[in-house]
């Protein structure tokens, strides 16, 4: 076990480099203020240093909000100005107090999108967890296929990718006219439920003709999990305690 001071006080923290990326972001970006105590709790349980992008994000930011809230990247959590973003620890159900015996063996949920897409950092054995990709690399649970996809990049590269302006291409076919206004009206605990569901032929053929409404994110993730099991696709497993 490494003490908190050892995790924080490193010679080459990643935060300055991340701040440079934030300034030059090609995607609309908001960096939320962090709850310092919660950020430190995240860092201690993760046992990663501020030298990593993951450690720096939980220590220095409450989270990242991209494309007006379409993608939320979890950090140390915040409750600033009445806007509550859950911390990485809360989303991943960390122990309330540091537990050296606990680890996120399946992997870490590090981001959600408003449709119920889940960005996760693979653990030591992604095959056993039913996820594609190598250990320590990113995977994405796609709400339109109810399946995990390998992103073939690590967490730091994923942050750079998010800020590169490629989200428009990544979500091609999943955004409807007026989506920016719909997303702007959400809280960070909400997503957008689409009916007919995104994985149906009807939604694939005419997304603009679907019915959409804001609902709690936990409801969207729960429905996706239930349908993945019913349809015979692989159980997606843990999608985050939204």
Image (cartoon, grey):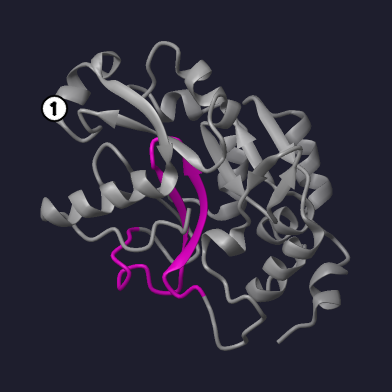
Answer above or below: position of 112 versus 115.
below
Extreme residue in the front direction: 82
- Position of residue 153 relative to residue 90, above or below, is above
Residue shown at the point (37%, 16%) measured from the top left = 176
Q: Residues within 10 Å of mark 1 (few under 14, many from 20)?
A: few
In the displayed structure, 228 sits above or below 96; it is above
Q: Residue 156, how many percent across, how many down? A: 62, 51
User: What kind of element bears circle 1?
Assistant: helix
Q: In which quadrant of the rendered image does the N terminus lie?
A: bottom right
Tell me, yes or no, whether the highlighted magenta stretch contains residue 26.
no
Q: Is residue 59 visible?
A: yes
Question: Residue 101 lies in what quarter of the image?
Answer: bottom right
Point 66% across, 58% down: residue: 54
Outermost top residue: 177
> Which residue lies at the image location 52% right of the left edge and 16% below the top edge?
181
Quarter assignment of residue 225: bottom left
Residue 147 in view: no
Q: Which residue is more in the foreground, 227 or 149?
A: 227
Q: Position of residue 183 (x, y in %)?
A: 51, 25
Give the magenta-colored segment's residue range. Answer: 104-132
Residue that label 1 marks: 201
Q: Is residue 124 magenta?
A: yes
216 left or right of 203 in image: right
Rendered location of residue 217, percent (x, y): 43, 44
Closer to the camera, 107 or 150? 107
């Amino acid at each position: 076990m490494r003490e908190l001071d050892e995790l924080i006080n490193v010679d080459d923290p990643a935060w300055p480099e991340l701040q440079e990326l934030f300034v030059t972001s090609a995607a609309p970006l908001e960096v939320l203020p962090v709850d310092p105590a919660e950020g430190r709790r995240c860092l201690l349980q993760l046992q990663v240093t501020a030298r990593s992008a993951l450690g720096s994000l939980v220590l220095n930011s409450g989270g990242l909000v991209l494309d007006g809230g379409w993608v939320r990247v979890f950090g140390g959590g915040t409750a600033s100005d009445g806007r509550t973003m859950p911390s990485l620890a809360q989303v991943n159900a960390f122990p309330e107090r540091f537990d050296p015996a606990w680890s996120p063996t399946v992997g870490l949920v590090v981001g959600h999108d408003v449709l119920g897409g889940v960005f996760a950092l693979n653990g030591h054995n992604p095959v056993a967890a039913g996820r594609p990709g190598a250990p320590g690399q990113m995977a994405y649970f796609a709400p339109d296929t109810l399946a995990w996809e390998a992103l073939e990049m690590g967490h730091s590269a994923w942050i750079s990718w998010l800020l590169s302006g490629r989200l428009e291409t990544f979500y091609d076919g999943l955004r409807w006219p007026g989506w920016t206004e719909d997303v702007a009206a959400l809280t960070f605990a909400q997503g957008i439920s689409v009916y007919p569901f995104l994985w149906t032929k009807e939604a694939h053929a005419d997304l603009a003709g679907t019915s959409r409404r804001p609902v709690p994110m936990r409801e969207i993730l729960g429905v996706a999990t239930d349908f993945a099991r019913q349809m015979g696709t692989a159980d997606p497993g843990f999608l985050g305690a939204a």
